[in-house]
Image (cartoon, helix red, strand yellow):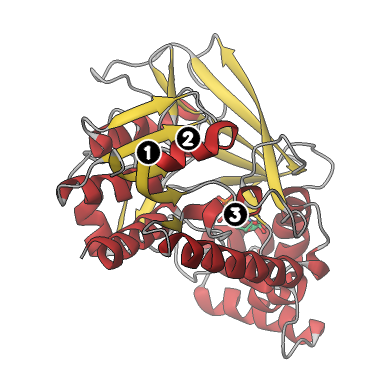
C-alpha cells in the first residue's frame, strides 16, 4: 500500500487543479515542487504592496463558462482588461489591431476605409494560401502593420524568422474593425484579487506540499510513496532527453523598483522594433489599477523588461516551440509516455503527463485548467 493515492510533481496550475479535484474525491495527494514557492509560473511576489508577476505577466481570460465558474471558487477577479500599447521607435499604437491602430497607421477614419486599405495591401502581396507567420500576418493586416508591429516583436520573441514560424501563433491576435482595445476576445477576464499565488493556495487547501525538492534526485523514493504520479514538468526532462531536447523559448526578466508612481501608464508596452533588445516592459501595479489591497495609491512602481532567449539546459522553459520539427519529436516522447504508463500499470501504478510542459503545448491558463479538469474527470470519475 502506498502512502498517497497521487504524487503531483509541480505545484503550478495543472497540478493544483488536479490536486483539488482529487482531494474533493477523497483521494490523498502529496504535491512536490523544485521551487521554494507554489503556483509555478503564475507565482506573484509582493514588492512594496505591488504583486509582481515574477515569471511573466498573466492575465486570466476565458470563454469557457465552466472554467470561469471553477476559478471564481478560489479567487475574486478584478475587472482588469488587457490593452497593451505598441511602441515602434517612439510611435505608439493600440493593440490588438483595431480602428485606433489603423487610424494611427494610415489616417483612415471609417471601418470601410480601414478594410479597403488592408485589402489593398493584401492584394499587393498576392498571398492566397499563407504558408508561414509572415504570409499569414500580411494577409491578415497588410504589410505596414506587419513591418511595424509584428515582424520585430515576433522575431525577438521566437528567435526565428517570421518565414520560419507557424502561422497559428499570429492567429492568437484579434483583428477588428471596431474601436476596441481589449486584447482578448473573451467573455471573462481579470486578475485574481490578492494574486495568483493566493488562488493556487486556495486550490491546494490543506494538501501536503513539499517545496524545494527535486523529483529526479530521489525519483524512486517519491514514486514509492504514491500509486500514481501526475507529472507537470517538461516531458523530455522526464526521459532524460534521450531522444534529444525539445526546443523552448526562455525569458529573462530585469526588474526595477522605481521611486515614482507611474512609469509608462499601462501594464504592458510592447517594443515592436527589432533594435530594442527587450520585447516588452510590464508595469505590474496597473494589473491592480495602481492600488494596494486597501485601495490606496501606490507611490512606487515595479517594472520588468522581458528578454527572450533560446532555452538551454538549466534555463527555465517558458514557451514550447510548436513547429513541425518539435511537434514530431514531441509525438515520439508522447509514445514513450504511453509506454511508461503501460509499464507502470502492470505494477498497479501509473503516470499522467499534464500542463504546458508536460504536454508541450502553448496553453493559456484557462486551457490548462480546462485540460486539468478533463483529465481529472477521466481519472477520478
Ligand atoms: N505579436 C506581435 N506583436 C505584438 C504582440 C504580439 O507580433 O505586439 C505576435 C507575436 O508573434 C507573438 C504572438 O503575437 O508571439 C502572440 O502574442 P501573445 O501576446 O498572445 O503572446 P504571449 O502573451 O503568450 O507572450
The numbered mark, 3 or 1, whose residue comes first in the sequence reads: 1
At x 35%, y 55%, the residue is 369
Residue that mark 2 sits on? 221
Q: Label 2, secondary structure: give it.
A: helix
Residue that mark 1 sits on? 225
Q: Quadrant of residue 252?
A: top right
The numbered mark, 3 or 2, whose residue comes first in the sequence reads: 2
Q: Nearer the viewer, mark 3 or mark 2?
A: 2
Residue 20, percent from left and from top:
24, 45
* Cα gap from disc 2 to disc 1, whole angstroms: 7 Å
Residue 150 visible somewhere in the drawing: yes
Residue 24, percent from left and from top:
16, 48
Q: Quadrant of residue 294?
A: top left
At x 48%, y 67%, the residue is 342
- Residue 15, disc: none
Residue 289 visible somewhere in the drawing: no
Amino acid at each position: 500500500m502506498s502512502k498517497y493515492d497521487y504524487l503531483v510533481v509541480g505545484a503550478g496550475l495543472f497540478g493544483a487543479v488536479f490536486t483539488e479535484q482529487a482531494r474533493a474525491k477523497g483521494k490523498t495527494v502529496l504535491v512536490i515542487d523544485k521551487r521554494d514557492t507554489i503556483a509555478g509560473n503564475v507565482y506573484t511576489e509582493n514588492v512594496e504592496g505591488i504583486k509582481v508577476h515574477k515569471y511573466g505577466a498573466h492575465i486570466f481570460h476565458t470563454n469557457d463558462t465552466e472554467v470561469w465558474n471553477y476559478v471564481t471558487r478560489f479567487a475574486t477577479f478584478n475587472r482588469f482588461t488587457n490593452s497593451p500599447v505598441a511602441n515602434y521607435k517612439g510611435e505608439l499604437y493600440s493593440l490588438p489591431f483595431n480602428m485606433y491602430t489603423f487610424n494611427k497607421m494610415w489616417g483612415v477614419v471609417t471601418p470601410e476605409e480601414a478594410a479597403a486599405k488592408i485589402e489593398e495591401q493584401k492584394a499587393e502581396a498576392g498571398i492566397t494560401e499563407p504558408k508561414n507567420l509572415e504570409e499569414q500576418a500580411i494577409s491578415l493586416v497588410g504589410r505596414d502593420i506587419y513591418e511595424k508591429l509584428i515582424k520585430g516583436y515576433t522575431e525577438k520573441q521566437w528567435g526565428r524568422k517570421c518565414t520560419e514560424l507557424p502561422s497559428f501563433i499570429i492567429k492568437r491576435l484579434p483583428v477588428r474593425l471596431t474601436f476596441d482595445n481589449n486584447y482578448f476576445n473573451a467573455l471573462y477576464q481579470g486578475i485574481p484579487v490578492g494574486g495568483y499565488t493566493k488562488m493556487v493556495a486556495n486550490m491546494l487547501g490543506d494538501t501536503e506540499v513539499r517545496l524545494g525538492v527535486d523529483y529526479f534526485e530521489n525519483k524512486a523514493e517519491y514514486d514509492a510513496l504514491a500509486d500514481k504520479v501526475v507529472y507537470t514538468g517538461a516531458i523530455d526532462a522526464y526521459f532524460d532527453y534521450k531522444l534529444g531536447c525539445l526546443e523552448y523559448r526562455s525569458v529573462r526578466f530585469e526588474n526595477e523598483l522605481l521611486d515614482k508612481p507611474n512609469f509608462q501608464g499601462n501594464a504592458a508596452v510592447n517594443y515592436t522594433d527589432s533594435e530594442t533588445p527587450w520585447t516588452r516592459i510590464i508595469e505590474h501595479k496597473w494589473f491592480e489599477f495602481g492600488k494596494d489591497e486597501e485601495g490606496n495609491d501606490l507611490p512606487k512602481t515595479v517594472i520588468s523588461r522581458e528578454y527572450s532567449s533560446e532555452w538551454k539546459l538549466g534555463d527555465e522553459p517558458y514557451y514550447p516551440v510548436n513547429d513541425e520539427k518539435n511537434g514530431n519529436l514531441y509525438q515520439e516522447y508522447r509514445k514513450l509516455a504511453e509506454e511508461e504508463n503501460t509499464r507502470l500499470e502492470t505494477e498497479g501504478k501509473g503516470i499522467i503527463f499534464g500542463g504546458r510542459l508536460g504536454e508541450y503545448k502553448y496553453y493559456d491558463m484557462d486551457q490548462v485548467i480546462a485540460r486539468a479538469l478533463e483529465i481529472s474527470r477521466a481519472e477520478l470519475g
